[in-house]
Image: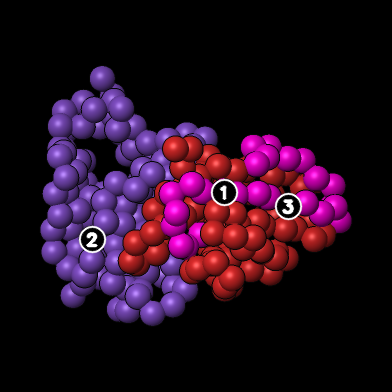
Chain colours: A purple, B red
Amino acid sequence: QKEVEQDPGPLSVPEGAIVSLNCTYSNSAFQYFMWYRQYSRKGPELLMYTYSSGNKEDGRFTAQVDKSSKYISLFIRDSQPSDSATYLCAMNSNTGNQFYFGTGTSLTVIP
Amino acid sequence: NAGVTQTPKFQVLKTGQSMTLQCAQDMNHNSMYWYRQDPGMGLRLIYYSASEGTTDKGEVPNGYNVSRLNKREFSLRLESAAPSQTSVYFCASSGGPGGMGKFFGPGTRLTVL
């Protein structure tokens, strides 16, 4: 079983839709949870960063962490064509080199 | 402020050849990382350096060596390249808690024939 599972998609939505991206994980030691956006042939860029459980909002983006279910989500409101990219979840513990990424979900927002 | 820079952008090697991938950051970050990204596998940590003078193995260190030359620079060396090392390599740096390399470079696309 992989440490982090993420549905690769692809996901295609119309402009203005609400997008929900999700990851599950198996290691209860994970404390830090992140979402990255990666455009084609570019490096990942950090979108959201949360510590432990709860919600965090930044503009059109909301990150949710449910540690009891080992489940994290990223919501994108009023999606735009410029949101078309691959979204990677990532997480690690605070005690060592346990850094793990999901495989990424490819999103296309259709104008 | 260039962020994280990597050289070269592209490289083709023959099996058994060696090369060094260079990475530099100008954000005064303590931590630096090397990842590889393969289709269907996501990003996997090769090595990281929590601070100048220290390096540690990540998830997939075999076949690689690293050097933290100073606070700015972190290089990745392939001593004897193998086709299994064909990948896109990303360097990253972080100055905050939790690690994970918050700022990524543009990547190096390596093909080993």
Q: Is residue B79 left or right of residue B110?
A: right
Residue B22 falls within the magenta-colored stretch? yes
Q: The C terminus of chain A lies in which quarter of the figure?
A: top left
Residue at 39% across / 59% down in the picture? B95
At mark 2, the secondary structure is: strand
Percent across and percent down for residue A85 are 37, 36
Percent across and percent down for residue A8 are 40, 48
Q: The N terminus of chain A lies in which quarter of the figure?
A: bottom left
Subunit that carries the residue with mark 2: A
For the residues beneath circles 2 and 1, the answer to whether they share a chain is: no
- Residue A61 in sight here: yes
Separation of marks 3 and 1 at Cα, in angstroms: 13 Å
- The 10 Å Cα crowd at callout 3, few under 14, some 14 to 19, many 20 or more, is some
Q: Which residues are magenta?
A: B7-32
Subunit that carries the residue with mark 1: B
Residue at 21% across / 70% down in the picture? A52
**Viewer-proximal residue, B107 or B103?**
B103
**Viewer-proximal residue, A42 or B113?**
A42
The answer to which image quadrant residue A28 occupies is: bottom left
Residue at 44% across / 67% down in the picture? A99
Q: Amino acid at mark 2?
A: Thr
The answer to which image quadrant residue A33 occupies is: bottom left
Q: Amino acid at mark 1?
A: Ala
- The 10 Å Cα crowd at callout 1, few under 14, some 14 to 19, many 20 or more, is many
Query: In the rendered image, which residue does mark 3 sit on?
Result: B20
Query: In the rendered image, which residue does mark 2 sit on?
Result: A50
Q: Amino acid at mark 3?
A: Thr
Residue B28 falls within the magenta-colored stretch? yes
Residue B24, which numbered label? 1
